[in-house]
Amino acid sequence: MNFDPRFSGRKFASVGTRPIRPDGVDKVTGRARYGADFNMAGQLVGRILRSPHAHAVIKSIDTSKAEKLAGVKAVITAKDLPDLTDGDAAMHDILDNCMARKKALYDGHAVAAVAAIDARIARQALKLIEVEYEVLPHVTDVDEAAHHHAPLINDQVFTEGLEEKPAKPSNITKRTQFGHGDVHKGFAEADFVVERSFKTEQTHQGYIEPHACVASVNADGTADLWVCTQGHFVYRQHCAQLLGLEASKLRVTSSEIGGGFGGKTHVWAEPVALALSRKAGRPVKLVMTRDEVFRASGPTSATSIDVRIGARKDGTITAAEATLRYSCGPYAGSWAEIGAMTAFACYKLENVKTVGYEVLVNRPKTAAYRAPSAPMAAFAVESAVDELAKELGMDAVDFRIKNAAQEGTRASYGPVYGPIGIGPTLEAVKHHPHMKAPLKENQGRGMACGFWFNFGGQTCTDLNIGMDGSVSLAVGTVDVGGSRASLSLVAAEELGIDYSHVKAIVADTSSLGYNDMTDGSRGTFSSSMATISAARNAIKILRERAAQTWDIPVEDVHWEKGHAIAKGEKYGNLSPLSLKEIAAASGKTGGPIAGHSELVADGAGVSFATHICDVEVDPETGSTRVIRYTVVQDAGKAVHPTYVEGQYQGGAAQGIGWALNEEYIYGKDGRLQNAGFLDYRIPVCSDLPMIDTQILEIPNPNHPYGVRGVGETSIVPPLAAIANAVSNAVGVRMTHIPMSPPRILAALDAEREG
Amino acid sequence: MVEVTLWGSLSAVAGGKARHEIEAKDIRELFRKLAEQYPGIEPWIDRGIAVAIDGTIYRDTWSKELPKNAEIFLLPRLAGG
C-alpha cells in the first residue's frame, strides 16, 4: 500500500456539506431495487421447511411425495449441501445453520427446501415432506443453559479458556478474561461498593427488508446471485466454499438494502437458493417471510451480567469487575468476549477485571447487531455507575468526568488510548441545555456513556473519468447509511470538482477486487481512504496529460481546485487546464483516465458517545414514553453531517425499542411466541420524540481527513440511559431489559412489598 | 526487541505469561516467532488476532512495523455489525 493515511488537517470545500444523496430519488419514488425486486426469466420460487422443535434428532427425511407433485422442480436436504468446509469450524456452523445435518437445534432451523413453479405449489410441497424427529430436552434461557444440569446442546463442546481442560462437556463454549491491576486490593480501598445483577432479553436487528435473493447456477458451472447483503464479496466467498464453486465464476450483485445492522453479514438462505437452482437447472428466487426472519435469522444475545464497582469518598473508582454470560444460539461465538472488552472501556481504572462466558442455547444462531455485545455490557455498567454516583452524593455526569478515560489511559481491554472523545462528550452533555430543562411528575432523566472499537479492512475502489469530465466511482462496500453520498463528496474534494459531477455505485464482485463487508462502522472510513487514494492516482495521470499537452516536465505541473497549473515564472502564459479539458483531450493523450486503489484500511479510531434521555412513566400501567433524547458523539470528521446525524438518531431509535419493548419470548415448548411485528414491537415514528444530535470532531490521526466510524456507537448508551431515566422516574433500580410495562409494574410491586 | 502483551486467554497458551520480549520488525514476524515459540498460538492466529500499537488497532496490516519502545498489545480480532 503506497498511501499515507495520516491526518493532514486540511481545509475542506466539499466534505462537511450536505448535498442530496444520489440514491434518494430512486428510493422515494419506489424505483430502487431491493433484494426481492429482481427477477429472472423462468425463475422458480424457493421455500424452506423448518423444524417445529427446539432440539431434536433428525432420524429421517422422506421427500419422495414432494418430488412427485406437479410443478415441483427440486427438493433438497443437507445431502445436497455436502460438507466442503475442510475443518473450518466457523464455516461448518454456517453450513449447518443453513440446513440442519443431524439435529435441529432451534425452532425454525432449516431441514429441507423446495423449488416450484409458484409459491402455492412450493408450500404444498413442504407439507408433503415427511421428517421423523426424536425430540430432545431443550434449553433457551442463558442462565439455565450455563447450569451443569442443563440439557447438552453439543456433547463435543468442552469449555475453552479454563486453566485445566474440563472432564465433562458443557454448554459454555469459552471463558475469556480481560483487565489489569488487582481488584481485591481496589475493593479494599473503596468506601462505597455497588453490586448488582442485570439481564437483557434477546432482540432482533429488526431490519425492515427480509432476507431475499435470486440464484442462478448455469450448466457450465458459472453462477449469479442477486442478493440483499452487507457484504457481497463475503457472500461470494461463503457460497463458493459451501457449494464447491470457483469464486471468480460466481458473480454476486448486491441490491439496495433495507437495513442490516449486522444481521446480513453472513449467509442464511443464499446457499440453499444456489443448491436448489443447481438441482433444478433454473433460477430460484428465495424470500424469507417475517416469521422466518425472526425464527431463523439474526438475533443478538440474551445476557446475564453481574457488576461490582467500588469508589472512594472523593469519587475515584478504585476497582471494577463484571461477569458476563451471553447466549450464542446453538453455535460457538465470541459475544461475551466483546462485552467483556467493552464493558469498562469508558473509564480510567487502576484495577479492573471482566470475565465472559459464551453459552449455547436452543435459539437461532446469534448474529452481530450494531456494536455487537456492547449495549448490554454498557447497560449493566452504566446502571451501576449511576447508582454509585448517587451513593457518593455526586452528580452522575461529574462522577463520570472524574473517572473518564483520556489519552494515555490504559483501556480496560488492554492497550493505552491515543486521542479519544469520551471526555469531550461528557463536557458537552454537562453544558447541554437538555440537562437543565425542568421535569414534571412521573418524569425522570438519565444519561449514559458508550464505547465502540470501529474497524477498517480490505477495500478496493475504481475511479473513472469520462470524456466529458464527469466521474464514476465504483466501490465495493455496500451502502447501508448514505456512503455513496459521502464517498462522492470525498472524490469531489480530492479532484477539486463539484459533487454533482460524481456518481458513485456499488460494483458487483466480478467488476472490482475483494472488499470486506460493511460492518464495524467501516463503510465510509475504509472506502473514503481508498477513494482518496484512487483520486490521487487519477490526479497523477491528469498532471501527466497536462504536462504532455504543454510539453513541460510533469514535476512542474501541480493540481489545484480541479485544474492542472504550470508552476514557475517561465510558464506565465499557460492558462490552467481544467479536469474537463484534460478529459476531453484524453483520447489523444494516452486514452482513458482512471485511478485505482486497493488497500487495507487499518487504524480506525475508537469512538465514544454520551446520551441524555427524559422519560415519563405511567405508574398505573407501567407504560414508558421517551419525551426528549439527545445524542452527543465523536465522529472524527463528519463527511456528510446529515447522514452522521441519521446514524446517531437511528442508533438511539433502535436502542429505545430494545430498552422498552423488544424481546424474544419463548414458550415452555421452546418455540418462539412472537415472530412478527405485531407481537414483537419495534418503535414507530409516533413512539419517538425528535432525537437531538451534537457532532463532536476529534480527528482520527490514522485517516487523511480524521474520519472515524459513526454507525454503531450510537446504539451503545441507550439501554443504560433509558434505564437510568426510568429508575430515576419511578425510584426503583431497573435491572431487566426490556423495561416493558409488566416488568416495570412488577418492579414497583416488589419495591412496595419490600 | 519489542515487548508484547497478550490478553488473558491467549497468555494461557503462551506459557501462562502475559508479557513477552520478541525480536520482530513487523506484525508478520511477530506472529511467526510467537507461533515458533508457542505452537498452541497458531490456531488463534488462524482465527484472527488484532495488534494494538500505541493504542491503534491493526487487524490485517501484517506489514505494519513495530516501532521500538511502542506499546504492543494483542487482542482478539473482533467482528462488527
Image (tube, coloured by chain):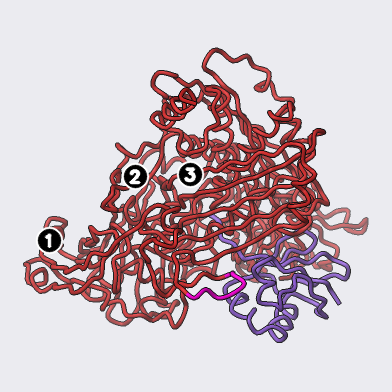
Chain colours: A red, B purple
Q: Which residue is mark 1?
A: A127
For disc 2, the chain is A
Question: The N terminus of chain A is located in which quarter?
Answer: bottom right
Residue A153 x %, y %? 37, 66
Determine the secondary structure under disc 2: loop
Mark 1 crowd level (few <14, some 14–19, many ≥20, 10 Å Cα): few
Query: In the rendered view, would you say A460 is above or below A387?
Result: below
Mark 2 crowd level (few <14, some 14–19, many ≥20, 10 Å Cα): some
**Tag count in the figure?**
3
Label 2, label 3: how far apart the Cα atoms are: 12 Å
Q: Earlier in the sequence, mark 1 or mark 3?
A: 1
Q: Earlier in the sequence, mark 2 or mark 1?
A: 1
* Main secondary structure along the magenta-highlighted residues: loop
Residue A135 x %, y %? 23, 64
Q: Nearer the viewer, residue A222 or A90?
A: A90
For disc 3, the chain is A
Disc 1 residue type (three-letter): Lys
Query: Is circle 2 on the same chain as circle 3?
Result: yes
Q: Which residues are magenta?
A: A161-167
Residue A593 in sight: no
Disc 2 residue type (three-letter): Ile
- Whether the magenta-drawn stretch holds residue A671 is answered as no
Query: Is circle 2 on the same chain as circle 1?
Result: yes
Q: Which residue is mark 2?
A: A665
